[in-house]
Image (tube, rainbow, N blue to C red):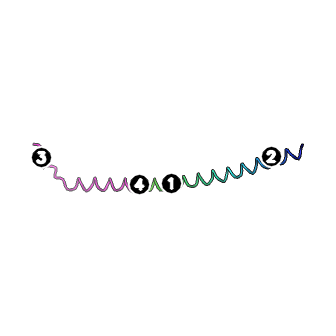
Amino acid sequence: MNHDRIIELEIKAAYQEDLLQELNTIVSRQQQQIDRLEATCRMLHERIKSLSVDSHSGESMEEVPPHY
């Protein structure tokens, strides 16, 4: 009976090792995706800032809007 219990514990440990490896792989992929999303957000933020600066540089403060 003691031998069977040891085998059962070894099997459980093997399953846990497999699960841990699978979870590590998932976490690694998620971190890569987060890194890509953060880079995209930074790029979009810089692009929005540059478009905002470009649009304001072409406007004259004394120009009357078309609806007046």
Residue in the picture at 27% in, 54% down:
53
Callout 4 touching callout 3 (CB < 8 Å): no
Q: Earlier in the sequence, mark 4 or mark 3?
A: 4
Between 29 and 15, the residue placed more toward the observer is 15
Q: Which residue in the protein does label 2 denote?
A: 9
Q: From mark 2 to mark 1, how far is it between C-alphas?
A: 36 Å
Question: Mark 1: which amino acid?
Answer: Gln
Q: Residues within 10 Å of mark 1 (few under 14, many from 20)?
A: few
Q: Which residue in the protein does label 3 denote?
A: 66
Q: Residues within 10 Å of mark 4 (few under 14, many from 20)?
A: few
Q: Which residues are magenta?
A: 41-68
Q: Earlier in the sequence, mark 3 or mark 1?
A: 1
Secondary element at tag 1: helix
Q: From mark 4 to mark 2, how far is it between C-alphas?
A: 49 Å
Of badges 3 and 2, nearer the viewer stands: 2
Q: From mark 1 to mark 4, how far is it between C-alphas?
A: 14 Å
Q: Earlier in the sequence, mark 2 or mark 1?
A: 2
Q: Assign the C terminus to one quadrant of the image.
A: top left
Q: Which residue in the protein does label 4 denote?
A: 42
Residue in the picture at 37% in, 54% down:
44
